Image (cartoon, helix red, strand yellow):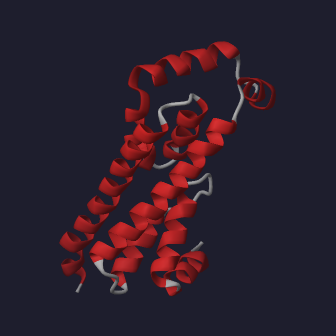
Amino acid sequence: MENFVNFLLDWGYLGLFLGAFLAATILPFSSDVLMVGFLAIGGNVYGAVAVASVGNWLGGLTSYWLGRLGKWEWIEKWFKVKEETIVKHKAKVDRYGSLLAVFTWLPLVGDVLAIALGFYRTDPKKTALFMFIGKTARYIMWAVLYIWISPMFR
């Protein structure tokens, strides 16, 4: 994984974009580490937040649209999930709707949540907006933490 991070860092902003995009799909990868590494080698904070946010957001939207391709029958057949479970989760998604997309930045569950929001057919425009807000807030948080903590290590 270290070699992959170094490879992406060598590519600059394009590597940050690609890493953030891939991390928002089902690929188990931390774009947070990449973001901090990018800042540590002298990347511009504003540019890094913008590039990582857009990359991660587009990756999340890719997961969302893959979820929209899903069918209830496939979930039951291939993942052995009972219809009652699917209906129970749908009720939760229906209750909160697209607002749940704010939480697609969360490690481990965020990617699954993006797919689920697509599968349950939440409003695409609202989902995209809330997803962008959540993912951007995440990178702003990392940038602020980096700015705050990095002087302690110089």
For the image shown, how many numbered marks are present on the structure? Answer: 0
**Image quadrant in which you'd find residue 154:** bottom left
**Would you place residue 111 above or below residue 91 in this image?**
below
Q: Residue at x 47, y 33 (%)?
A: 123
Check the image and name the residue furthest to the right: 77
Q: Residue at x 43, y 28 (%)?
A: 97
Say left or right for 94 vs 102.
Answer: right
Say left or right for 2 vs 47.
Answer: right
Q: Residue at x 50, y 31 (%)?
A: 122
Check the image and name the residue furthest to the top: 84
Q: What x and y, as percent, mark residue 59?
A: 54, 56
Relative depth, front residue between 6 and 93: 93
Check the image and name the residue furthest to the front: 125
**Would you place residue 96 above or below residue 8 in this image?**
above
Say left or right for 88 vs 76.
Answer: left
Task: Pick the quarter of the image with the N terminus.
Answer: bottom right
Say left or right for 86 vs 39.
Answer: right
Residue 29 visible at all? no
Q: What x and y, as percent, mark residue 33?
A: 44, 68
**Image quadrant in which you'd find residue 22:** bottom right
Q: What x and y, as percent, mark residue 110?
A: 49, 44
Relative depth, front residue between 25 and 146: 25
